[in-house]
Amino acid sequence: MMWLEEFRRLSKVFLAIVLIFALQGAHTELLVSAAGPTEVNAVAGRNVTLATPFSGAPDTSVIWLMGDVPVAIWIIDSLTPANIPENHTDVLKIEPNGSLTFVNVPLGYSSNYTVEVTVSGLGKSLATFTLRVFEIIQNVTLSSAKFAVEGADRFTLSYSMLQGVVERQTWFVNGTEINTNSHYSVEKQSLVILRPNRRDAGQYMVSLTNPFSSETAHMNVAVLYGPDDPKLEAHPAQPFYESGDSLNLSCEAEGFPKPTVKWAFGDQTLSESLGQVLNLTNIQTSQGGNYTCTLLNNESKEERHKSIILKVYERPSGSSMCYVQSVNNVTLQYYCRWAGGTPEAQLSFLALSNMSSGAGNFSLTVTATDDLDGKTVTCQAFHPLEQDKCNITASSPVKFLPAVKTTVDADDKIAVTIHCVSEATPQAVVSWSKGGEAVTNGSTYQISTDTTQLKISDYNVTSFHLQNYTCVCSNPLGSQKREFQLRRPSISDFSGLPNQEGTVVRLSWEVPPTSVVTGFDIQMKGPDLVTDNSNDTQTRGSSDKFRTIQHRPGSVRSADIFNLDPKSTYRFRVIPKALMIVGEPSEIHRIGPGEGLSGPAIAGIAAGIPCSLLFLLLLGGFIYLCVYCHKNRSRQTRYPVSRAVEKAITIQPDTIPPHNLLTGGLKSLPDYNRLQQTPSERSVALPSFVPPAPVRVATTV
Ligand SMILES: *[C@@H]1O[C@H](CO)[C@@H](O)[C@H](O)[C@H]1NC(C)=O
Ligand SMILES: *[C@@H]1O[C@H](CO)[C@@H](O)[C@H](O)[C@H]1NC(C)=O
Ligand SMILES: *[C@@H]1O[C@H](CO)[C@@H](O)[C@H](O)[C@H]1NC(C)=O
Ligand SMILES: *[C@@H]1O[C@H](CO)[C@@H](O)[C@H](O)[C@H]1NC(C)=O
Ligand SMILES: *[C@@H]1O[C@H](CO)[C@@H](O)[C@H](O)[C@H]1NC(C)=O
Ligand SMILES: *[C@@H]1O[C@H](CO)[C@@H](O)[C@H](O)[C@H]1NC(C)=O
Ligand SMILES: *[C@@H]1O[C@H](CO)[C@@H](O)[C@H](O)[C@H]1NC(C)=O
Ligand SMILES: *[C@@H]1O[C@H](CO)[C@@H](O)[C@H](O)[C@H]1NC(C)=O
Ligand SMILES: *[C@@H]1O[C@H](CO)[C@@H](O)[C@H](O)[C@H]1NC(C)=O
Ligand SMILES: *[C@@H]1O[C@H](CO)[C@@H](O)[C@H](O)[C@H]1NC(C)=O
Ligand SMILES: *[C@@H]1O[C@H](CO)[C@@H](O)[C@H](O)[C@H]1NC(C)=O
Ligand SMILES: *[C@@H]1O[C@H](CO)[C@@H](O)[C@H](O)[C@H]1NC(C)=O
């Protein structure tokens, strides 16, 4: 049975020490092998044995080395105990077969162990073991600074644990394993992120393992960054806005934590609670300017600004306006104005100068030259929202006729007002002279502030007459001169027109342009007028003498005589007067059945009147057209419109003060009356010749 036991013991071992006896001379070799794994892991505090098989050969000595240091020496089967250094005796024990046992092995016994087996006479042999002692890993935690900061040098994430020996640490981010590379460095107990950036945010995990346990720990890492360069935009984006428009400004930038936004307009901070969108509704021009948004990272205190200039424009009011003024009667100053608006409109007179321009109200002074006379100068007015143009034409004074108006003052002075108005741009300045001497303001002569009127007041009408007056209208482009004399009261173009029945006649007359007239006496010769009222002031007299039947004021140019007896013959004339001065009577106009004229003949004449009227109307229309065309074609003398020529059908009471006697023109000039008093005008003024109601009849004998 001995051999069987021996065999069993041998069969338990995996490797056997083989003693080879080489009987060639005295040369022998001894081999020794481990009886179990040479890599041994152990949990601290447990028992562990490094096993060495023993052949049973006599005089076998065993030496265990921990690293290079011998920690146990023993001769197997000897009675003396193993030689173990004192500080190892609690832990190390030699088994009877030479194996080394560690009792409650502490962490410090992780090492390489070597066993030397020496058999007397056969030499010695070596076997090596590696013992690693581990502790169970417990309570692992990760720690780091609060945030990783983008752009910093490094961010360290380190782990700590209550206890444990780590054989292997593995790091993960978002579940992906991290390997040491240019961005990560896995160090003892920590992970270092080099130059962290915003993409490094995520969930980090460390996994710690040894052969007996494994633990993990997680941590979310946030990366502080931003604010980045803000994006400040206006919606809708436009180069400028019109007042009343609405828009919003948005200011955004990446950052963690999310940046807070502050808005400022110029130096003025706007309400803090606006958020990243600033709404501007119905903006006004005052709201145009520099808007700044400031983004702040509350954690890192990093701040970024961005500015945008909003342009808010407003149309100028109305339209542009051009005018030209005279400076010292020598130079012309062209003005262009377009008021209001933001910004002010840019104005320029390109025809005069392409160098200078102005905003809002622009003027350009140029020397008056002939080529500017009648030249249309255009002002270009440019505003971003609207363009405009205006024209101005400077022109020298045109030929003109003086107009005379005569009135009687309250103190019975006669006042003659002479107008010398010549169309000109800039307005002409008038200088007056009498008989070669300049007229100055005084009690007799008064020149209006715009110089276009000269008023002469005197008690004595004769002192006006036969004086040579001159008026000169001038502006920087030229001048026009007129000379004239005031004339005694006189009448021209006297005529009368009876109605069909021969009961009413309209008398009409004219006054030469420079005649001074304050009133007219209408005189009649013939039987007394048929009347039943006795209110009139007319003188009665015998039917063969002229007697005054009406007084008419100086402004009137016609009179109607009622209640004529169609069977009688009448003669009419008009006496012009200037206060007490009596002028030449007019021609005599006769109506009624004259010698040889029968009743039917008169009826025929009466029937012809409408036909003549129609003919006169046509003829007048033709002449008027000719005159109109002629006037328009050339810049010629313009005659003041005679407002004085009133053609009242009803009889005006004599109490109306004389007024508005307008006359004009010298005898050398074109026939004033032909131009102003065309037949058409007369005809038109006498539409149907219906006699007024009898109640209005004021004429009697
Ligand atoms: C380890 O060995 C010692 C001494 O031989 C013994 O007292 C102890 O119970 C052993 N421990 C274990 C866990 O086997
Ligand atoms: C035991 O003592 C020796 C010297 O006597 C020393 O070198 C060794 O480090 C000590 N070992 C331990 C585990 O204390
Ligand atoms: C054990 O030996 C191996 C290789 O021989 C060596 O790499 C290792 O560092 C040694 N261990 C110790 C604790 O000396
Ligand atoms: C270690 O972890 C366990 C369970 O996870 C817990 O019960 C224990 O209190 C922890 N110990 C310490 C010191 O944190
Ligand atoms: C981890 O995931 C988060 C969210 O999905 C992502 O923002 C982050 O960039 C990821 N981190 C890495 C390092 O991939
Ligand atoms: C700005 O206008 C938008 C829509 O036009 C609205 O949703 C937002 O609340 C407004 N913001 C403020 C601060 O009024
Ligand atoms: C706008 O305002 C900001 C802050 O006051 C300033 O820095 C910036 O220069 C201004 N921009 C302009 C164009 O004036
Ligand atoms: C203005 O100048 C013109 C000539 O250019 C001259 O005839 C006129 O008398 C001047 N008028 C005044 C008021 O100086
Ligand atoms: C200004 O004059 C030009 C030519 O002289 C003409 O074409 C334009 O219509 C005029 N503009 C106005 C506003 O009168
Ligand atoms: C009016 O003036 C004229 C000439 O100037 C003179 O002959 C006449 O006597 C004056 N008449 C009166 C009433 O003064
Ligand atoms: C007015 O002028 C005319 C000719 O131009 C002249 O004959 C007359 O004597 C002048 N009259 C006066 C009062 O100077
Ligand atoms: C006559 O004149 C008086 C006042 O002067 C006036 O009241 C009256 O109505 C007149 N009679 C007629 C018929 O006009």
Image (spheres, rainbow, N blue to C red):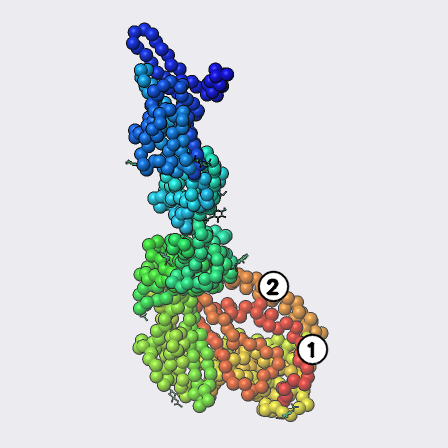
Please name the residue shown 55% across and 88% down the image. Answer: 655
Spatial separation of the CA atoms under disc 1 and disc 2: 25 Å
The earlier-in-sequence mark between 1 and 2 is: 1
Residue 699 marker:
none
In the rendered image, which residue does mark 2 sit on? 618
Foreground residue among 189 and 308: 189
Q: Is the C-beta of the residue carrying label 2 under 8 Å from the nearest atom of ligand 9?
A: no
Q: Which residue is mark 1?
A: 501
Residue sitting at the far front: 79
Q: Secondary structure at mark 2?
A: helix
Q: Position of residue 346 (x, y in %)?
A: 39, 58
Q: Residues within 10 Å of mark 2 (few under 14, many from 20)?
A: some
Q: Quadrant of residue 615?
A: bottom right
Q: Nearer the viewer, residue 521 or 235?
A: 235
- The amino acid beneath tag 1 is Glu
Q: Secondary structure at mark 1?
A: loop
> Which quadrant of the rendered structure holds the C terminus?
bottom right
Rendering coords of residue 466 (x, y %):
38, 79
Residue appearing at x 32%, y 37% in the figure: 87
Is residue 485 visible in the rendered structure shown here?
A: no
Quick check: which quadrant has ligand 8?
A: bottom left
